[in-house]
Each structure stands twice: as C-alpha cells, then as structure tokens.
Image (cartoon, rainbow, N blue to C red):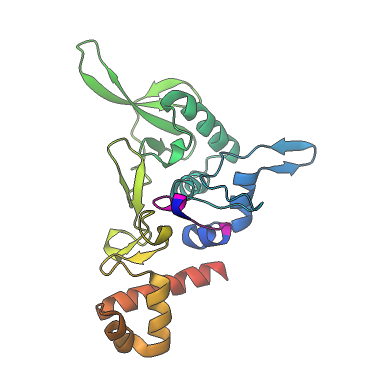
Amino acid sequence: MGELIGVGLYTPAEAGRLLHVRAAKIVRWLHGHRIGNHHYEPLWAPQINIEDGRIYLGFRDLMEVRVADKFISYGVSPQRVRAAIQLSREIIGEDRPLSTDRFRTDGRDIFLRVVDMDEKGEQRERLLNLFRRQYEFDQIIEPLLKTVDFDEHGAPLQWWPSGRRGNILVDPTRSFGQPIDAVSSVPTAVLAAAGRQEGIAGAASAYAVPRASIKRAIEFETAMERQAA
C-alpha cells in the first residue's frame, strides 16, 4: 500500500457518498459503458490500479468527478464535458484537467482560463471557449472550486467538503484521503462512531479532542449516510 501514500484511496461507493454522486455513474465514467451499439470509452484512466478487476479512485479522480458532475448540474451536457476533457488535455497537457483551477462555466459552455502575453510582453488572463475556440470576455459565474486548495501549478491539494468553516478536510496525504476533523486530524468516521457509542463528552475525552470535533463528525457522517440511503 506504500504507493498509495499521498494519492488517496476510494471505492466508487465511498466517492459517491462524499460527492453525492451515484456510484454507478462514477463506474461508468471510469470504466466505460455501452448504450445500444455505441461504446463509450472511460473519460480518463483512474490513478489507482490494484489489478483486482475493480475500480478505485485517487484524490485527483475524486476532484475530477466532482467537477464533471458539477458542470452537468449547471446544464452542460455530458457530451460537452467529455469534449472539454479531451480538448483541455491538448491545451494544458493535464490528464485530469477539470480538477485544476482553470475552469469556468456559464451553464451552456465550458471555458478554460489561459494566460498569454500581449503585444507589450505583459501577461494577461483570458477565457477560451473550448467549443467555439475563441476568446470570451463576458462576465461568467464565480469559480466552482472555492472549497479546494490548489498548488502553484493549479492542481488540487486538499478539499473542504463542508466548506472552509466546516472544519472537515479531505487530504490525500493524511488517512489515505478519508475525511478527517481538521482540528484533531482524526477521521470523522472514527469520531462519529465513538460519539454515538460513548456520547459526545466521553468520546471527546477518549480521543482528547474538543467536543465540537465530535459533534461535527457526527453531523458530517450522518449527512453522508442520508445521501447514500
């Protein structure tokens, strides 16, 4: 399992619970599927291949699924999302381009943020419409990835699934990417289970964490269980 350190490890069911996306949809996207006589190739190759015939996701896969599903919920067709992935790979050279910090949408098209030089040799930032292949300057919605921390190259580092004030963190370098309480670094599943069994005060004492950590872990895990039901 050493090669998984810093990558994260999720089954489609675990990813689905975190992202509120059906596990079957995730499997379709990463395994490919057939509709009638037409076969759809996987959108991308998963980060993890344990060679047991099953689909597993790494943290970058998790973020890619999250953004692809978000685009679709904004009204962008699945076909356009697929095309955006293919075009963006050519433009920025990223195998999982949607999970970078360079995308925007207006609910119809997908835009890629690009930086180039103007005639004075100064950098300028513009938006490339991936389907019209021209630059757009119209006002569009705020970035979708406000709850993600990125590195200097725009790749996702960690995710705050309940928002930054929620103090729940998904970090592939910690606990194999399972959700943790950001204050104590203890997995939320562990804290929630302890809180339900021993009570909030007892669990907080046993794990030497604030009672607030137990409460938010229970709330977070309960919300995921409801989504999965």
Q: Based on the displayed image, in which of its 4 quarters is residue 42 positioned?
A: top right
Farthest residue, direction top: 119
x, y (%) of residue 26? Answer: 58, 51
Farthest residue, direction right: 37
Is 37 covered by the magenta stretch? no
Residue occupying image coordinates x 64% and y 55%: 24
- State the quadrant of the C terminus: bottom right
Residue 218 seen in the figure? no
Q: Left or right of 103: which side holds 82? A: right
x, y (%) of residue 158? Answer: 34, 52
For the image shown, how many numbered marks are present on the structure? 0
Note whether 146 is above or below 107 in the view shown: below
Note whether 110 is above or below 173 in the view shown: above
x, y (%) of residue 157? Answer: 34, 47
Is 7 covered by the magenta stretch? yes
Q: Which residue occupies the foreground of this view, 98 or 44? A: 44
Q: Left or right of 71: which side holds 142? A: left
x, y (%) of residue 64? Answer: 47, 45
Residue occupying image coordinates x 38% and y 83%: 195
Q: Which residue occupies the foreground of this view, 174 or 130? A: 174
Q: Left or right of 15: which side holds 123? A: left
Q: Which residue occupies the foreground of this view, 72 or 65? A: 65
Farthest residue, direction front: 2
Q: Based on the displayed image, in which of its 4 quarters is residue 200 positioned?
A: bottom left
Magenta part, dominant SS? loop
Residue occupying image coordinates x 34% and y 57%: 160
Residue 21 seen in the figure? yes
Magenta part of the protein: which range? 3-12
Note whether 144 is above or below 120 in the view shown: below
